[in-house]
Image (cartoon, rainbow, N blue to C red):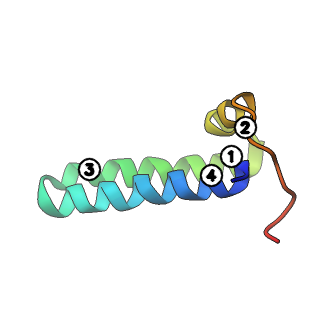
Amino acid sequence: MTVERSILLIVGVIVLGSVLLAALHSQNWLWLTGIMGAHLIQASFTGMCPVVMTLKRLGLPTKAGFA
């Protein structure tokens, strides 16, 4: 698994989890979905993502683009 695919997996799990928690528990969990969206926008402009840096330190390989 590459860093790029890991990020897609992590963000997808967090977004789906927060939507499920919002539906079953409290709508306040939708804030987490909004924060993830804002972070994705910020990361697209700055190129800085703490999760990416962590995954690279763990030794996951990177691969340019979606091949």
Q: Is residue 4 left or right of residue 32?
A: right
Binning the other alpha carbons within 10 Å of mark 1 as few (below 14), some (14 to 19) or many (20 upward) gives few
At x 33%, y 49%, the residue is 31
Q: Are marks 1 and 3 in contact (CB under 8 Å)?
A: no
Q: Which residue is mark 2?
A: 48
Eyeballing the image, is 40 above or below 46? below
The amino acid pointed to by label 2 is Met
Q: Which residue is mark 1?
A: 43
Answer with mark 1 or mark 4, whichever residue precedes in sequence.
4
The secondary structure type at the circle numbered 2 is loop
Q: Picture coordinates of residue 43 (x, y %)?
A: 68, 46
**Mark 4 against mark 3, which lies toward the viewer?**
4
Q: Is residue 28 left or right of residue 34?
A: left
The secondary structure type at the circle numbered 4 is helix
The amino acid pointed to by label 4 is Ser
The secondary structure type at the circle numbered 3 is helix
Binning the other alpha carbons within 10 Å of mark 2 as few (below 14), some (14 to 19) or many (20 upward) gives few
Q: Are marks 2 and 1 in contact (CB under 8 Å)?
A: yes
Quadrant of the rendered image containing residue 54: top right
Q: Which residue is mark 4?
A: 6
The amino acid pointed to by label 1 is Ala
Q: Picture coordinates of residue 49 (x, y %)?
A: 67, 38
- Alpha-carbon span between mark 4 and mark 3: 23 Å
- Alpha-carbon span between mark 2 and mark 1: 5 Å
The secondary structure type at the circle numbered 1 is helix
- Alpha-carbon span between mark 1 and mark 3: 22 Å
- Alpha-carbon span between mark 4 and mark 2: 16 Å
At x 57%, y 46%, the residue is 39
Q: Which residue is mark 3?
A: 29
